[in-house]
Image (spheres, rainbow, N blue to C red):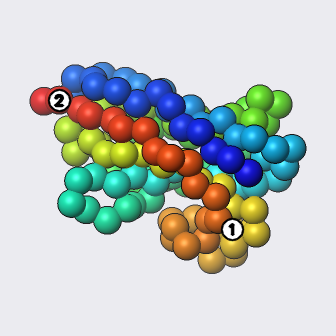
Amino acid sequence: VQLQACGGGLVQAGGSLRLSCAASGRTFSTYDMGWFRQAPGKEREFVGAINWTGGTTYYKNSVKGRFTISRDNAKNTLYLQMNSLKPEDTAVYYCTADSRRRARLYGYSDSGNYDYWGQGTLVTVSS
């Protein structure tokens, strides 16, 4: 599986962006998916995840109510709608896929439970 994230950019605080992650391959619809981010000088952190059907989502507390994860299995695409952006949301955002069903067993917020990663897209939020 290859993942290609896009949609990042520069936005003012309070603004919105929608990230997309296009996946190759026919098995996208069977994978749980996640979004992580890494700010300069910081470790990569969990943002949110969605199960393979799209029926269940999980979020980092600080983004709940502002970010929404969704997926379109017919288009092999994962989305991250980000509203009310804050300067502290500035980071490189990565989409990731779990083909081994580890995330649902051992935790969606653990990056080690995902085995495919996109290249990342930079989101910069100015104050």
Looking at the rendered structure, the secondary structure element under dot 2 is strand
Q: Amino acid at mark 2?
A: Ser
Quadrant holding the C terminus: top left
| Label 2 crowd bin: few (<14), some (14–19), many (20+), radius 10 Å | some
Looking at the rendered structure, the secondary structure element under dot 1 is helix
Residue named by callout 2: 126
Q: Left or right: where does residue 102 sit relative to residue 25?
A: left
Q: For residue 71, say whether it is visible.
A: no
Residue named by callout 1: 104
> Could you say where residue 99 lies in the image, as x and y percent from the top left?
75, 62
> Could you say where residue 80 lies in the image, as x and y percent from the top left?
52, 36
Q: Left or right: where does residue 58 sit relative to residue 15?
A: right
The answer to whether residue 88 is above or below residue 31 is: above
Residue furthest bottom as drawn: 106
Q: Residue at left 46%, top 45%?
A: 120
> Could you say where residue 103 lies in the image, as x and y percent from the top left?
65, 68
Quarter assignment of residue 104: bottom right
Q: Residue at left 22%, top 45%?
A: 88
| Label 1 crowd bin: few (<14), some (14–19), many (20+), radius 10 Å | some
